[in-house]
Image (cartoon, rainbow, N blue to C red):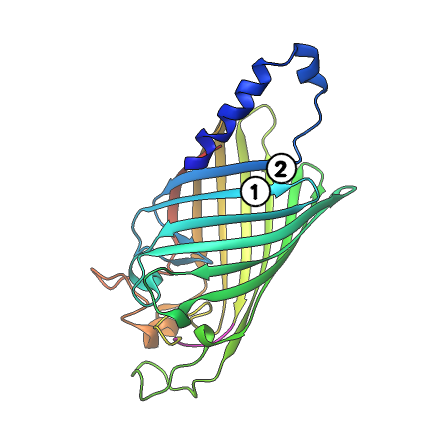
């Protein structure tokens, strides 16, 4: 969040130079910059640990125009399964368009998942579309995420690895999600629920990883956020329906480095996020 210290300072200087009435009636800025930094007990991507079931440090920044167009970036440390060919960092580059129509918000865009230090064929490009609305006190979001056929999602051949046979052909991946959030009246607590479904290449990609490691699986979570000013403490339980027997052919990749425990098993998560 190195930029967040510079831009608010400029806004603050101009604010003190204007009369109070002018500040109250000033139009919104055409460009807004927001960001966050967080520490989490684990980085779970669609239910699967990307940090070898260890602590993750994450952060992101978004630049949005009043038209609805935005760009952003987000990053996290990685370990174990999540290193994608050797990188210890995930860096996502994001571009999209978000607009509210009456009570519904549409958000469409593309994410380029990159892994600095990893192999080139590990990068993944994924398009997304999300629709958000309300039902009583709850905010509901439905999402579709589609990664078209690309090398990073391909089967590996039996000669390249003993884990699973394949023809090396490019594969695609689709992820469907549903999220719900509802604030508890007169409290700083927001209750949250998530469910997701992955359908993609049933095995290992060229660098020993996959967006849908067993081909098709469900992930879900239940949790709550406690917010104080710009700080949010999150607690959640995350799980998948991937059994140990289903993931056996992916080991040792699909297990914790130190003790071999499954990285898609249910777990409790704790995170602390600061928004800027």
Residue 244, image quadrant? bottom left
Discs 2, 1 touching: Cβ within 8 Å: yes
Q: Pointer 2: what residue?
A: 31
> Marks 2/1: CA distance?
7 Å
Where disc 2 sits, the SS reads: strand
Which is more toward the observer, 114 or 10?
Answer: 10
In the image, 204: left or right of 230? left
The correct choice, above or below, for 89 with respect to 165 in the image is above
Q: Position of residue 132 (x, y in %)?
A: 67, 47
Q: Residue drawn at (31%, 47%), measured in percent from left and top?
A: 55
**Residue 203 seen in the current view:** yes
Asked whether 201 falls inside the magenta stretch, the response is yes
Q: Position of residue 197 (x, y in %)?
A: 54, 64
Q: Residue drawn at (51%, 30%), measured in percent from left and top?
A: 7
- Seen from this angle, which residue lies furthest right? 102
Q: Residue drawn at (55%, 47%), measured in percent from left and top?
A: 193
**Disc number for residue 63:** 1
Q: Mark 1 Cα within 10 Å, few/some/many (few <14, many 20+)?
A: some
Find the magenta span and give its range.
200-204
């Amino acid at each position: 969040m190195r930029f967040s210290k510079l831009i608010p300072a400029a806004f603050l200087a101009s604010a003190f130079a204007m009369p109070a009435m002018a500040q109250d009636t000033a139009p919104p800025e055409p460009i807004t910059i927001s960001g966050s930094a967080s520490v989490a007990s684990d980085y779970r991507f669609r239910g699967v640990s990307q940090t070898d079931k260890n602590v993750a440090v994450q952060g992101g920044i978004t630049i949005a125009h009043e038209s609805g167009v935005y760009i952003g970036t987000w990053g996290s440390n990685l370990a174990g399964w999540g290193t994608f060919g050797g990188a210890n960092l995930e860096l996502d580059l994001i571009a999209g368009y978000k607009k509210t129509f009456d009570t519904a918000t549409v958000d469409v865009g593309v994410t380029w998942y990159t892994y600095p230090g990893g192999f080139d064929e590990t990068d993944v490009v994924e398009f997304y579309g999300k629709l958000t609305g309300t039902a009583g006190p709850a905010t509901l979001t439905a999402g579709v995420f589609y990664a078209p056929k690309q090398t990073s999602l391909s089967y590996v051949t039996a000669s390249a690895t003993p884990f699973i046979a394949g023809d090396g052909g490019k594969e695609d991946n689709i992820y469907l999600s549903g999220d719900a959030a509802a604030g508890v009246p007169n409290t700083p607590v927001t209750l949250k629920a998530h469910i997701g479904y992955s359908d993609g290449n049933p095995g290992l990609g060229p660098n020993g990883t996959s967006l849908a490691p067993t081909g098709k699986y469900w992930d879900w979570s239940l949790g709550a956020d406690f917010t104080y000013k710009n700080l949010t403490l999150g607690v959640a339980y995350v799980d998948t329906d991937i059994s140990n027997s289903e993931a056996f052919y992916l080991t040792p990749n699909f297990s914790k480095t130190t003790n071999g425990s499954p990285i898609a098993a249910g777990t409790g998560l704790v995170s602390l996020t600061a928004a800027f």
